[in-house]
Image (cartoon, rainbow, N blue to C red):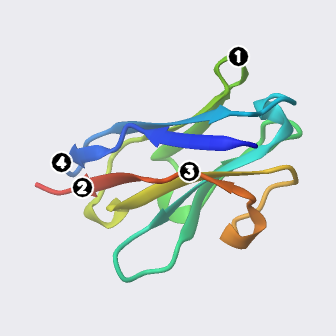
Amino acid sequence: QVQLVESGGGLVQPGGSLTLSCAASGVTEGLDYYTVGWFRQAPGKGREGVSCISRSDGSTYHRDSVKGRFTISRDNAKNTVYLQMSSLRPEDTAVYYCAARAGGVGDSPSAYDYWGQGTQVTVSS
């Protein structure tokens, strides 16, 4: 059974940076067997896709509002996916989740089979 654990969230000032980590266990086929996505959910809002990294060739995708500010990467040796966030804005405040699926890329939460418990990111002065 695949298990995902996020870490790295916290309080940061506008314009600051954070790096989130998603550590996977139970991935007997290796983490690169899975497409991994980062999602976020702000209070009173639905869960939205932020970034994902493809299982096939490691291609990365980002929602428009984070392009140029967020970078997703994968360390297969550590079974960990990272989300580097910079130039953070108050509207980036949310609980961030990582999720995995044994299929291609997608930004719909319903397409993902495995989820972490989430980590809070708060951008405020």
In front of the other: label 4 or label 3?
3
Q: Are marks 4 and 2 in contact (CB under 8 Å)?
A: yes
Task: Tell me residue 78's x, y (percent).
Answer: 64, 20
Q: Amino acid at mark 3?
A: Gly
Point out which mark residue 103 bears: none
Which label's residue is closer to the chain start, 2 or 1?
1
Q: Nearer the viewer, mark 2 or mark 1?
A: 1
Tell me the amino acid under the disc marked 4: Gln
Dot label at residue 123: 2
Residue that mark 4 sits on: 13
What label does residue 77 carry, if any? 1
What residue does disc 3 label? 116
Q: Position of residue 25 (x, y in %)?
A: 67, 32
Residue at 87% over, 30% down = 29
In this view, the mark in front (2 or 3): 3
Mark 2 vs mark 1, CA separation in Å: 31 Å
Instruction: Please state which amino acid type lies under the numbered disc 2.
Output: Val
